Amino acid sequence: MLEFDVFSDIIESSVKNQKQWGTSMNDIQYMQQALELAKKGAGHVNPNPLVGAVIVKENKIIGKGYHQKYGRPHAEVNALTSLQESAAGATMYVTLEPCSHYGKTPPCVDAIIKNNLKKVVIGSLDPNPLVAGRSIAKLQAAGIEVETGILKEECDELNTPFFHYITRKTPYVIMKYAMTSDGKIATHTGASRWITGSEARKKVHEDRNRYTGIMVGVGTIIADDPMLNCRIEIGRDPIRIICDTTLRTPTTSHIIETAKQIPTILLTAQTAKQKQQPFIDKGCQIIPIPLKNNKLDLQSAMQILAKQGIDSILLEGGATLNASALEAGIIQKVQVYIAPKLFGGASAPTPIAGLGVDHPDQAYKLTNKKITILGEDTLIESEMLDVRG
């Protein structure tokens, strides 16, 4: 997979080549550069969206920027700040509709109007009711031409978690697992390191950087004692979330011992203070979750986590938690890493435990399949359909 900076370099080279030959980039190419800029904010802007902006005047890029960190200036303002000359009469290409309200920063539309831009080209419309359509109306009222829908699908896909979080008020949950070609996530002895190769594992850590939280069940902690951190350069560790109904997590585990360095949440039905206190002393946050059918009510858990600003969760749990998450209907996307290996074994664990469905027509349906080759492994990403057939 190419890194975001490599893509940006390719597009920059395209700009230079087209200047040299006296031609200009078209709308799609300018928006592509805005998209690559936006991706640079991955892991640093949540729960805000990823946004990139490019300012063009007389077929020349005179400014560009992206949203770099939550609470800091937005992409449009950063692009305007980087201007090499006056933006009067220029066109701005921005991946998401500019904001029109006061939040952590002033409205971006005001800065655009102040700089006398002639036109704004927008990829995605913002579903946030504080923004949706209002920004466009304000720009048009100021005499600025607005065009929408350039690379809409790509711009929408970039911020799928944000759109879900804003409209559903729950985190966007990605169920991720690695398995062999015969569908095993471990051998019959429980050994699972490593099923996939280095390129696939690198992609997992890129996602840990991108998404706000990572969730596992207590069984995974007991079996593997993982750190659940992000191991890429200048990466951001996700908030670690453990589903532990009765607080069985060992207080000597890596994840508990490092809770003061990396935010760690325990979702539990255990309310006894003497059981909670050792974890609190280690720096963990305890969140009480009601039971439903003798299991943690994951729908309630998602609503509570959303109120804490957790907009997205990478679910790296084992087969039991995967089954519970499916039954609770909290999953929006599935990532399956498939290694060209066979483990065999009737007792070797598979990705999803529980009873499963009774008939094929009751299956959980997936759609919008995307396939990526990562070294010798294959990643299949699909979206969950809201309605089961």
Image (spheres, helix red, strand yellow):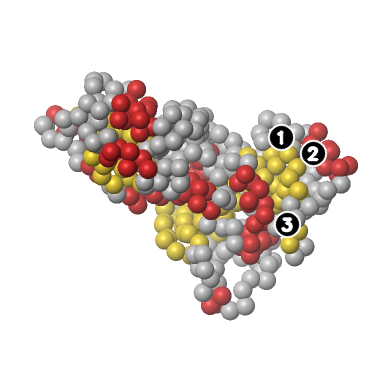
Quarter of the view holding residue 117: top left
Q: Where is residue 52 drawn, in percent x and y?
A: 36, 36
Q: Where is residue 137 drawn, in percent x and y?
A: 32, 42
Say which amino acid is labelled 2. Answer: Phe
In the structure shown, which secondary structural element does the residue marked by tag 1 occupy?
loop
Q: Which residue is mark 2?
A: 279
In the structure shown, which secondary structural element does the residue marked by tag 2 occupy?
helix
Seen in the picture, residue 14 relative to 313 is either above or below; the reply is: above
Q: Where is residue 357 drawn, in percent x and y?
A: 61, 74
Q: Residue furthest right?
A: 274
Counting residues from the start of the chain, the first of labels 1 and 2 encountered is 1
Q: Nearer the viewer, residue 377 or 4?
A: 4
Say which amino acid is labelled 1. Answer: Ala
Counting residues from the start of the chain, the first of labels 3 and 1 encountered is 1
Q: In the figure, is residue 217 to the left or right of 234?
A: right
Counting residues from the start of the chain, the first of labels 2 and 3 encountered is 2
Q: Residue at x 44, y 36 (%)?
A: 101
Q: Residue at x 63, y 59 (%)?
A: 325
Q: Residue at x 50, y 30 (%)?
A: 104
The 10 Å Cα crowd at callout 2, few under 14, some 14 to 19, many 20 or more, is many
The quarter of the rendered structure image containing the N terminus is: top left
- Asked whether the residues under the numbered discs 1 and 2 touch, taking CB atoms below 8 Å apart as contact, a structural biologist would say yes
